[in-house]
Image (cartoon, grey):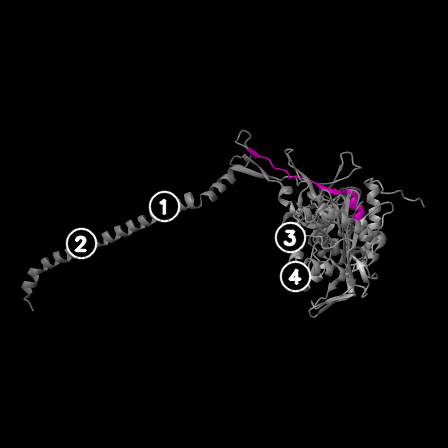
């Protein structure tokens, strides 16, 4: 241990050393404090820069819109949906509207304002045709401010409601205008028009022309943009801009309102009479392809489409309902044989009542053998063995396939209606004997009614096959018109073949199976088809069910109408000759009178 005197002598030196250490520690602490402050400053600066980048670059559009929303008012301008028209020779301008727009009302209640729920219910429910219990339950919610009662309320109902409210001093019942699609012809044009329904709260065309031309009919939304001050008031001298709404296009169809009404009436009556699943009528001009009427039954009202229980009635079977056509297809087979000159109307063969093809035996529909018969008799009596003779024995698989394709079966017609099917000819394209044989009489291939009419137009129009079309012209809001012209889509047979097969088909109507389709004084060509229905399990055919078809055109000297009538699974009737042929007889008589077609020969007065 150092002497005490030495420790005292060294004490000042130690104090100075400790002081120096304390100063150094303080300096270090100051340096750390500055570093932290610098770090914080750098961090804040980086954060601000990054945030400014996000606001000014990444989210620029959002904040621009937010700022604009504080100083600008933007309102949408809704366009009017384009109208759809049909022909009507009794109308002043020759056309009549079948789809238009009208203002209806949405009726609602403010239960908080209603003092007597029972009295309100007793008055309002009958006027609106509502269930009183439902109305009472809604108007009795005393703390509620809004309860919907009925949508799409007519002007007449609103007027009656307004009068009752004034008379009875009711409170709490209100209504607001709502734009609605309206179909003046109701169920009679629904197969063509379809309807406008709500999809995710957006009004969209569904089925028919409303769906097919939805974009053209909808138009384009416009807008009004105006400036406002910080308090939200409009600035009259501000910078304003208007983008006008573009109304939808107007469609002028080839449909004749009066022919459409007659067609729908007849097919609806037939479906009810025979308790059929469904039915279809199409009337077409064979020279142009213009569709004069197109109707499917059961009918439905597009003004009340939401009340339909079976949505299958919305489908337009005229373009989407592919089926095995049966014996009506024999007219196509005979046309092919005549065109290739492998047969004439007088060519004969031995009808034994059946044909064996490998393990299969095919019989005539009536099971009878007719001996030696000619080709006209094949059509008159609708002999399966006869068309097998033409397609399989004389034309052959490859040539038969070519004719089926030349008539454009298995292809879309392009008629511009929603839901069109192309059908199928897969069996025919395999070029096997059994498929050639069955397809010759309309089994083993599927076609649509509009496809069949397109093919028959070649028979009625000197071999020129016309594309079916239903829009005559589209009228733009600026007055520009896009017109649609008749279009020849093929010439599968010669004029001579068409005239020959037409004469043979006249015999079918005037002396064969379709005699009930006769129109006195006129020569119509036609062919029936009673097609068997495939079993639900796909194993063979159900002999207790059938689909009946009749196609006819005329007068054959100058064909102006081409008609298809079809019934699906009619009951209480065995053949198309007694189900659909008489429907054509009545419709054909109406058409020659309505279109003022001169008779081929004088009609005897009864």
Left or right, 44 with respect to 517, comes to left
Upstream in sequence: badge 4 or badge 1: 1
- Relative to the observer, which residue lies in front, 500 or 320? 500
Q: Which residue is mark 3?
A: 411
Q: CA distance from mark 1 to mark 3?
A: 64 Å
For discs 1 and 3, the disc positioned in front in the rendered view = 3
For discs 4 and 1, the disc positioned in front in the rendered view = 4
- Identify the residue shown where x is 83% and y is 61%: 573
Residue 349 image offset from top left, x and y in percent: 77, 60
Upstream in sequence: badge 1 or badge 3: 1
Category of crowding for the residue at label 3, using alpha-carbon neighbours closer than 10 angstroms: few (below 14), some (14–19), many (at least 20):
some
Identify whether 343 is placed above or below 599: below
Q: CA distance from mark 1 to mark 2?
A: 39 Å
Q: For the residues labelled 2 and 3, say whether their Cβ atoms are less than 8 Å apart.
A: no
Specify start and end residues of the magenta stretch as a single range: 241-264
Q: Which residue is mark 4?
A: 427
Q: CA distance from mark 2 to mark 3?
A: 99 Å
């Amino acid at each position: 241990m150092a002497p005490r005197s030495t420790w005292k002598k060294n004490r000042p030196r130690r104090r100075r050393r400790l002081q120096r250490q304390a100063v150094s520690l303080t300096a270090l602490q100051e340096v750390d404090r500055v570093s932290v402050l610098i770090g914080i400053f750098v961090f804040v600066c980086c954060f601000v820069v990054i945030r400014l980048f996000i606001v000014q670059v990444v989210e620029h559009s959002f904040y621009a819109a937010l700022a604009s929303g504080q100083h600008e008012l933007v309102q949408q301008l809704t366009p009017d949906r384009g109208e759809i028209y049909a022909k009507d020779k009794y109308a002043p301008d020759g056309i009549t509207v079948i789809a238009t727009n009208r203002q209806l009302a949405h009726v609602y209640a403010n239960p908080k304002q209603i003092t007597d729920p029972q009295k309100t219910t007793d008055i309002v429910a009958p006027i609106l045709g509502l269930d009183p219990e439902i109305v009472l339950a809604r108007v009795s919610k005393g703390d509620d401010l809004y309860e919907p009662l009925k949508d799409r309320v007519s002007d007449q109902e609103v007027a009656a409601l307004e009068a009752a409210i004034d008379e009875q001093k009711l409170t709490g019942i209100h209504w607001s205008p709502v734009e609605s699609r309206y179909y003046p012809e109701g169920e009679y044009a629904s197969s063509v028009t379809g309807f406008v329904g709500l999809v995710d709260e957006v009004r969209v065309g569904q089925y028919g022309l409303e769906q097919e031309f939805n974009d053209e009919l909808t138009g384009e939304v416009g807008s009004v943009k105006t400036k406002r001050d910080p308090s939200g008031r409009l600035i009259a001298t501000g910078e304003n801009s208007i983008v006008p709404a573009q109304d939808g296009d107007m469609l002028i169809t080839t449909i004749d309102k009066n022919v459409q009404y007659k067609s729908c009436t007849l097919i609806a009556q037939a479906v009810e009479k025979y308790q059929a699943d469904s039915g279809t009528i199409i009337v077409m001009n064979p020279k142009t392809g213009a569709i004069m009427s197109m109707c499917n039954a059961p009918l439905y009202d597009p003004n009340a489409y939401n009340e339909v229980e079976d949505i299958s009635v919305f489908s337009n079977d005229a373009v989407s309902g592919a089926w095995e056509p049966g014996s009506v297809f024999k007219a196509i087979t005979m046309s092919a044989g005549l065109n290739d000159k492998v047969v004439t109307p007088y060519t004969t063969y031995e009808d034994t009542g059946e044909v064996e093809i490998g393990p299969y035996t095919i019989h005539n529909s009536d099971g009878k053998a007719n001996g030696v018969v000619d080709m006209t008799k094949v059509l008159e009596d609708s002999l399966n063995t006869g068309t097998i003779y033409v397609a399989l024995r004389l034309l052959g698989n490859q040539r038969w396939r070519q004719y089926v394709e030349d008539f454009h079966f298995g292809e879309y017609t392009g008629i511009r209606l929603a839901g069109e099917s192309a059908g199928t000819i897969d069996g025919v394209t395999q070029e096997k004997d059994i498929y050639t044989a069955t397809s010759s009489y309309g089994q083993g291939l599927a076609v649509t009614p509009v496809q069949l009419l397109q093919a028959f137009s070649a028979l009625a129009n000197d071999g020129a096959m016309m594309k079916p079309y239903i829009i005559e012209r589209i009228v733009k809001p600026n007055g520009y018109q896009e017109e649609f012209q008749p279009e020849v889509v093929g010439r599968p047979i010669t004029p001579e073949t068409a005239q020959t097969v037409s004469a043979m088909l006249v015999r079918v109507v005037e002396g064969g199976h379709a005699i009930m389709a006769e129109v006195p004084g006129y020569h119509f060509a036609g062919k029936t088809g009673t097609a068997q229905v495939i079993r639900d399990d796909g194993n063979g055919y159900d002999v207790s069910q059938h689909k009946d078809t009749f196609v006819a055109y005329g007068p054959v000297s100058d064909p102006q109408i081409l008609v298809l009538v079809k019934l699906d699974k009619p009951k209480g009737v065995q053949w198309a000759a007694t189900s659909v042929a008489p429907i054509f007889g009545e419709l054909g008589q109406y058409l020659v009178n309505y279109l003022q077609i001169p008779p081929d020969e004088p009609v005897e007065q009864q």
